Image (cartoon, rainbow, N blue to C red):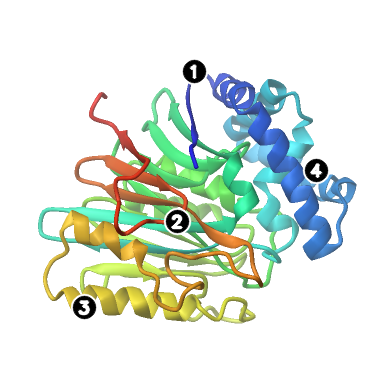
Amino acid sequence: MTIKQIVCSGSPYEIGFTHGIEAAPEIERAIAFYAKLFIKHSKLDWAQVRDLASEFDDLIKVKWPRYYQELQGIAEGSKQDLVDILALNVRTEIVFGQFSDGCTSLYYQGSDYAYQGQNWDWSEEQGANLVQLTIAQAGLPTIKMITEAGLIGKIGLNSNGVGVCFNAIRAEGLDKSHLPVHLGLRMALESRSAMDAVNTLERVGMASSAHILIGDTITAVGLEFTSTTFARVPIHDGFIAHSNHMLLPHANIVEPTWLADSPVRIETMRDNIAAVGEPLSWETYCRLFADEQHYPCAINRAASVDSDVVTLFNIVMDLVAKRAEVRMGRLNLGDMDHKKIVLSFSEL
């Protein structure tokens, strides 16, 4: 699996237009992919999805005009309706997590280093619609991220050495006056430090539930949230590991179990770190994400007869060096350098 790499700069509209025009085929396919998924999982046809997405139009336009202008640029560049691009960016809020990507994330801190990364697990079909975006904005850190085409926020790092990872959570609740999850990921990626990102998201408020792992060279927070609550998972024994369920209590929140392997993946990660018995090297850290215990529902997930969800990419970040390595598809422990993509800010 390869990935298209796109460099965007200029005004918010220009950034979006470049994204849209260069990723037009991927955006068209992504819309078709989610149209099928909404029908399958929530019995919503695309016209109904568009109606629900349009409810966020005025909110984003008024509260976050830069993001709205970027979404307009994506729509015009890709020759899609703006409401279709909105639907991609608020898909989590439309169905309250009825379908969500599963994944495992890890921040690990040593005396002179800080590593952060994750596997991103989702339907094999959507793998062809991933893109790598570099976004240079006046007055803000430059961003390098892996995202689904048409989405303005996802997983990556910035030129200040802030890393952002994402785990879907299926806790109930929606507040349409707050920030949609994928816009929250973008906001975190624009922050100058991990704590700036955490404080900003808590101040703004989130529309639905998820976990965002936010780290830098100094510290990290596993920020769990719902439409009404926030909780900070702290560094413990030098690391934070997270998957697809809440680790901390959230008052008056209902969280149905949806991935039985979610606690197992965290325990596997913790056990593997403990088994090393010493500070992790970069190579050892990277190899943690290739673990196949409890296959196919492993950290390095494979598709099965019951599910087409598979690890679509792995990203590992050296936050001190402001550098990331991306490996597309499931990890091959015997060849960790196969098709490796390096994202670096050394040129800045």
Q: Is residue 295 above or below residue 62?
A: below
Give whichever of discs 3 and 2 has the lower sequence position: 3
Which of labels 3 and 2 is toward the front?
2
Q: Residue at x 86, y 62 (%)?
A: 43
CA–CA distance between discs 3 and 2? 24 Å
Q: CA distance from mark 2 to mark 1?
A: 35 Å
Please state if 334 lies on the left or on the right of 39 as rendered: left
The residue closer to the viewer here, 123 or 58, is 123
- Residue density around tag 1, few if under 14, some if 14–19, many if 20 or more, within 10 Å: few
Residue 175 position, x and y percent, is 69, 60
Q: Which kind of residue does numbered mark 1 sit on?
A: Gly
Q: Secondary structure at mark 2?
A: loop
Measure the alpha-carbon separation of dots 3 and 1: 46 Å
The residue wearing badge 2 is: 330
Instruction: Decide which of 19, 40 is in the foreground and name it.
Output: 40
Question: In this image, 276 relative to 64: left or right?
Answer: left
Residue 251 visible, this angle: yes
Helix, strand or loop at mark 1: loop
**Amino acid at dot 2:** Arg
Q: Nearer the viewer, mark 4 or mark 3?
A: 3
Q: Earlier in the sequence, mark 1 or mark 4?
A: 1
Query: Which mark identifies residue 274?
Result: 3
Label 2 packing within 10 angstroms: few (<14), some (14-19), many (20+): many
